[in-house]
Amino acid sequence: MKHFWVDEDASKEKLFYVLEHPDMASRERNFQAFLDEPKWQELRERTKQMFSENKVLDR
């Protein structure tokens, strides 16, 4: 991780981060590994479900 920061509006509870990769091939490989991670897939599905049920509104 190169840099990170939080949103000035603490109510948004958002964390931003910047990643650095030595080249595009590494970036693509690392991002695909992230997308394939079972924990990420589970969290993504839970988040989609929350939005579809209108439990989370971030607009």
Image (cartoon, helix red, strand yellow):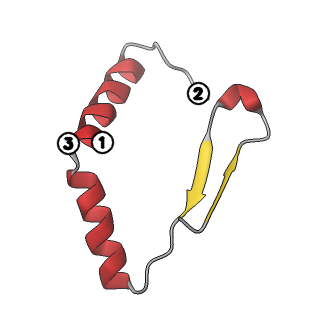
Which residue, given by chain and number where applicable, does mark 1 sit on? 40
Mark 1 lies on a secondary structure that is helix
Amino acid tagged 3: Pro
Q: Point out the residue furthest to the right here.
A: 8
For the point 25% across and 33% down, the residue is: 42
For the point 30% across and 83% down, the residue is: 25
Residue 41, relative to residue 18: is it above or below? above
Q: Position of residue 30 (x, y in %)?
A: 31, 68
Q: Do labels 1 and 3 touch, CB within 8 Å?
A: yes
For the point 32% across and 36% down, the residue is: 44
Residue 21, relative to residue 39: is it above or below? below
The span from disc 2 to disc 1 (Cα, nearest Å) is 20 Å
Which comes sooner in the sequence, label 2 or label 3?
A: 3
Which residue, given by chain and number where applicable, does mark 3 sit on? 38
Is disc 3 surrounded by few (<14), some (14 to 19) or many (20+) residues within 10 Å? few
Is disc 2 surrounded by few (<14), some (14 to 19) or many (20+) residues within 10 Å? few
Instruction: Tell which tag, 2 or 3, sits nearer the viewer.
Output: 3
For the point 32% across and 79% down, the residue is: 26
Mark 3 lies on a secondary structure that is helix
Q: How many marks?
A: 3
Q: Position of residue 29 (x, y in %)?
A: 26, 72
Q: Position of residue 57 (x, y in %)?
A: 55, 21
Relative to 12, 18 lies left or right: left
Which residue, given by chain and number where applicable, does mark 2 sit on? 58
Amino acid tagged 2: Asp
The span from disc 2 to disc 3 (Cα, nearest Å) is 25 Å
